[in-house]
């Protein structure tokens, strides 16, 4: 697939945004500036950005507990996301959601939750609404290898298959659910489960290659857009950090040699080399991009610092919608 230099540079920019944003969030949570914990996508940026950028701006996406990167990949500005992590009034959800509940409807980010597997029915429902409304929008659900064993995935895949819904089931196989290796709890190959539901199943073996992910998801998006129905895409990747920051699960559940081999395959370093080798940007331009993104993240922290905590009076606002106007 031939992609414009601007698009390729934007992929690198968004991967860098995720990396620097998550590094900053990791520091802030350890200093007590962010309540609770955060789950970073460090190491998984290619898989996130490749999938998000294969979608159109108006398309839908739903995430999980490891989901700062998903709205960033979809183009969300960093300030309101960082402010949300800290619980400030200018956060993207008014400071009431925090790290586990970012939603930015402006970029089609329908939300995320700590309930493993919950992204799946949400995106499937969004795809059903697209089909009923005929608005041409595609929906993508991000979920992990652990979530791939939740029953709701198979209920959703069955329904999406029967109704040819424009949905993509995107399994981020980072090979562990907390400290549980996927091969000890997962029978067979996740992508091959698609066959049981009459839909294509694709396994991207090198999820550290943003273009490989982009290409695979683009095919699925085109199929959905043509009205031909869902696709299951499994992307093999690796998280570089702990399951969540400060969790201290120990390190013995992941072999040191395995970790070293994967950290060698840093998606941002790899793609920088591609951009340079293809003459898309000079080393100086790539350095400037990195400095620019660092400044964007610092600006998001200044935005957060300048924002107040929410007024207690708004605590009970926005808890429920008024779905059919029954209260009026
Ligand atoms: C329904 C449910 N079961 C269990 C948990 C506890 N839990 C939180 S994250 C997690 C592991 C998820 O692993 P995976 O789906 O592979 O995503 P990853 O963290 O690797 O991105 C578990 C079991 C939960 N939050 N929700
Ligand atoms: Mg996992």
Image (spheres, helix red, strand yellow):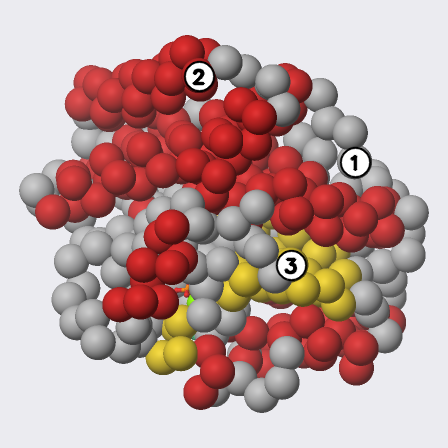
Q: In x, y percent, where is residue 154?
A: 67, 78
Return the mark for residue 20. none
Front position among marks 1 and 2: 2
Indicate the secondary structure of the residue bearing disc 3: strand
In the image, residue 54 sits, relative to residue 16, either above or below, namely below
Indicate the secondary structure of the residue bearing disc 1: loop
Return the mark for residue 283. 2
Q: Is there CB contact under 8 Å for labels 1 and 2?
A: no
Query: How many neighbours does mark 3 have within 10 angstroms: few (below 14), some (14-19), or many (20 or more)?
Result: many
Q: Quadrant of the N terminus?
A: top right
| Cα distance in 3D space between marks 1 and 2 | 24 Å
Query: How many neighbours does mark 1 have within 10 angstroms: few (below 14), some (14-19), or many (20 or more)?
Result: few
Residue ID for mark 3: 204
Q: Quadrant of residue 27?
A: top left
Query: How many neighbours does mark 2 have within 10 angstroms: few (below 14), some (14-19), or many (20 or more)?
Result: some
Q: Quarter containing ligand 2?
A: bottom left
Q: Residue at x 21, y 55 (%)?
A: 245
249 lies left or right of 11: left
Q: In x, y percent, where is residue 303?
A: 27, 19
In the image, residue 234 sits, relative to residue 10, either above or below, namely below
266 lies left or right of 144: left
Which badge, 1 or 3, comes first in the chain's sequence?
1
Residue ID for mark 1: 1
| Cα distance in 3D space between marks 1 and 3 | 16 Å
Front position among marks 2 and 3: 2
């Amino acid at each position: 697939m031939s992609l414009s230099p601007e698009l390729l540079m934007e992929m690198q920019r968004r991967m860098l945004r995720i990396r620097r944003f998550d590094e900053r969030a990791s520091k802030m949570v350890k200093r007590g500036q962010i309540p609770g914990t955060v789950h970073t996508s460090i190491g998984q940026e290619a898989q996130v950005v490749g999938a998000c950028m294969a979608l159109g701006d108006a398309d839908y996406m739903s995430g999980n507990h490891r989901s700062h990167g998903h709205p960033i990949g979809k183009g969300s500005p960093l300030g309101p996301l960082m402010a949300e992590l800290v619980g400030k009034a200018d956060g993207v959800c008014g400071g009431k959601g925090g790290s586990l509940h970012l939603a930015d409807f402006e970029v089609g980010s329908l939300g995320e939750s700590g309930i493993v597997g919950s992204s799946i029915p949400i995106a499937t429902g969004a795809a059903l609404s697209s089909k009923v409304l005929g608005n041409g929008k595609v929906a993508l659900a991000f979920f992990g290898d652990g979530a791939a064993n939740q029953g709701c995935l198979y209920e959703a895949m069955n329904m999406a298959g029967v109704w040819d819904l424009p949905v993509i089931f995107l399994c981020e196989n980072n090979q562990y659910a907390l400290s549980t290796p996927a091969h000890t709890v997962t029978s067979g190959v996740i992508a091959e489960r698609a066959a049981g539901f009459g839909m294509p199943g694709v396994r991207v073996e090198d999820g550290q290659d943003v273009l490989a992910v982009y290409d695979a998801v683009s095919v699925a998006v085109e199929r959905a857009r043509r009205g031909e129905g869902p696709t299951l895409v499994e992307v093999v990747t690796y998280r570089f950090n702990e399951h969540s920051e400060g969790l201290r699960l120990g390190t013995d559940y992941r072999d040191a040699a395995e970790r070293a081999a994967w950290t060698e395959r840093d998606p941002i370093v790899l793609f920088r080399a591609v951009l340079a080798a293809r003459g898309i940007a000079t080393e100086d331009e790539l350095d400037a991009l990195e400095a620019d993104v660092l400044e964007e993240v610092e600006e998001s922290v200044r935005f957060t610092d300048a924002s107040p905590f929410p007024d207690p009076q708004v605590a009970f606002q926005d808890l429920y919608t008024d779905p059919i106007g029954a209260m009026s």
